Amino acid sequence: EIVLTQSPGTLSLSPGERATLSCRASQSVSSIYLAWYQQKPGQAPRLLIYGASNRATGIPDRFSGSGSGTDFTLTITRLEPEDFAVYYCQQYGSSPLTFGGGTKVEIK
Amino acid sequence: EVQLLESGGGLGQPGGSLRLSCAASGFTFSSYAMSWVRQAPGRGLEWVSAISGSGGSTYYADSVKGRFTISRDNSKNTLYLQMNNLRAEDTAVYYCARGRIWFGDYWYFDLWGRGTLVTVSS
């Protein structure tokens, strides 16, 4: 099973600042098999990025993904008020599919 | 409108059973693999099970293998999760999710339902 470790656990930032979220895999994951989701309280997760760097339909271009091998990054260039949420990475290169533990982006 | 709507959650007894349903609309249901993903209170996401578009292939997390059964009825655009021998650690919100393949054999999830809460307690 591929374990995904996300850091930091919590990121305290102000609107307009840049957010950099990390997702590290316990073994190499092809970049085409890495996705990112956003979840707000009481809501279902929403797909942001698939294939490590491809934005899903309707996702603003302030969200970008990068990385390869065991290290992946989600970057939000300028935080908007609606971006404060929990973010999860997911690998789908092998079964069982696994998610990271999440990074909470909170208002400083 | 493209959507997924789960139902069937509630209170289950340890060792008991529950059956979850997920009604799909707005897309060709049989063309997509579907999954169940759960989230324990205050915790992260855990993939539970998946089924191919035809229903011919099924996949399970080790934590539910032998206790849960995923199935689908493409004529009714509905996904199911039969949950037997329930345990306290099965307490979670259960989401159904539409799977998409980007190369490879497995899925990321581009459409999610709102979830249904399952509580296992005596």
Image (spheres, coloured by chain):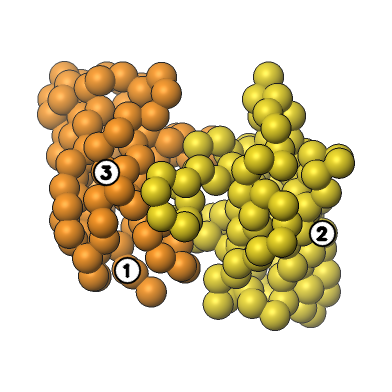
Q: Amino acid at mark 2?
A: Arg
**Residues behind callouts 1 and 3 on a single chain:** yes
Q: Quadrant of residue B115?
A: top right
Q: Amino acid at mark 3?
A: Ala
Assess disc 1: are there few (<14), some (14-19) or many (≥20) residues with their C-alpha within 10 Å of its C-alpha.
some
Foreground of the two, A76 or B14: A76
Which mark's residue is nearer the viewer, 2 or 3?
A: 3
Tally the marks.
3
Chain A: drawing colour: orange
Q: Amino acid at mark 1?
A: Val
Q: Specify whether A75 is left or right of A91.
A: left
Q: Quadrant of residue B50?
A: bottom right
Which residue occupies 83% across, 69% down? B17
Q: Pinpoint residue A56: horizontal percent, then vertical percent.
A: 39, 29
Q: Chain of mark 1?
A: A
Q: Specify whether A53 is left or right of A43.
A: left
Which residue occupies 18% across, 41% down? A66
Foreground of the two, B30 or B11: B30
Up-down relation of residue B5 to residue A78 (above or below): below
Residue designated by label 3: A52
Q: CA distance from mark 1 to mark 2?
A: 29 Å
Assess disc 2: are there few (<14), some (14-19) or many (≥20) residues with their C-alpha within 10 Å of its C-alpha.
some
Residue designated by label 1: A3
Q: Secondary structure at mark 2?
A: strand
**Residues behind callouts 1 and 2 on a single chain:** no
